[in-house]
Image (spheres, rainbow, N blue to C red):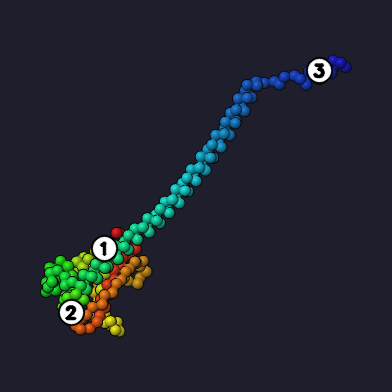
Amino acid sequence: MENSKCDRNAARFAPISGNPKRADGAFLASRNHLRGQILSTDLVISLSMFLAALLIFLLVWSTIAYAYWESLADIGMQSALISISDALAFTPGSPPGWEFSAANASSYGIAASRNHLSPAKLSALSGQFSSNYTGAKERIGAGRFDIFVSVERAEGGEQLYGFGRLPSAAGQQISSAGIERLCMLEGELVKVKVQLWRKKGGSL
C-alpha cells in the first residue's frame, strides 16, 4: 500500500521527458515568425497610406496649378485686350497710310485721328483678316489669342463692320474678354467692340 503511494507520487513529480532547450527554441522561432508577419503587415499598411496621401497631394496640386495658369492666361488676355482696343481706336497704325499697302504694315490702327475712324482702314483691315487671319491677328497684337472686332451703330446696334473669328458653339470650353470704345465714323457715333478668346487649357 505504502509502495503504491510512493509510486504515484514519484510519477506525479517525475521530470518531463524531452529537451527543454529545444522547446524554448521552437517557442522563440514561432514568436519571431509572428513578429515578422506583424512587421510585414504594418509595412504594407504604411506604404498604402503613403501612396494614397501622395495621390491626393498630386491631384490637389494639379488642380491648383491648372487654376493658377488659367488665371495668368486671363490676365494676359485682359492686358492684350486693352492694348489692342487703344491701338485700333486711337492710332492710325504704322505706317499711317498702311491701308494702301497693307502687306507692309507693322501694326494696325483704324483711326484717321483719335476716336475718329477711317472707312478705308476698316475695309483694309477686314480684307487682311479675311485673307490671312493668323498674320492679321499677330500684327494687331492678339498673339496667342483669337480675336473678333466689330463696329456697330451706337443706336440700334447694327453691325457695320465685322472681322476676325468668333468661338464656335460646338461645346468648346473657352475663356473670353471684351471691351467697347465709343468712336465717330463719318459723323455717326459707333461702338468699336473687341473680343479676345482662347480655349481653356491651351498654352500660355
Name the residue beneath numbered marker 2: 119
Secondary structure beneath dot 3 equals: helix
Task: Name the residue nearer the viewer: 105 or 79.
Answer: 79
Task: Name the residue nearer the viewer: 83 or 127.
Answer: 83
* Percent coordinates x, y for residue 139 in the rendering: 19, 66
Of mark 3 and mark 1, the one earlier in the sequence is 3
Apparent side of residue 97 relative to residue 52 in the rendered image (left or right): left
Residue furthest to the right: 1
Mark-to-mark CA distance, 3 and 1: 107 Å
Query: Amino acid under label 1?
Result: Arg
Q: Is residue 188 above or below residue 17?
A: below
Circle 3 or circle 2, nearest the eye: 2
Quarter of the image with the N terminus is top right
The circle drawn on residue 23 is none
The circle drawn on residue 7 is 3
* Percent coordinates x, y for residue 172 in the rendering: 35, 67
Q: Is residue 38 above or below residue 82?
A: above
Mark-to-mark CA distance, 2 and 1: 28 Å
Circle 3 or circle 1, nearest the eye: 1
Name the residue beneath numbered marker 1: 144
How packed is label 2: few (under 14 Cα within 10 Å), some, or many (20 or more)?
Answer: some
Q: Residue at x 14, y 74 (%)?
A: 99
Asked if disc 3 and disc 2 are in contact, CB closer than 8 Å, the reply is: no
Query: Amino acid under label 2?
Result: Pro
Quarter of the image with the C terminus is bottom left
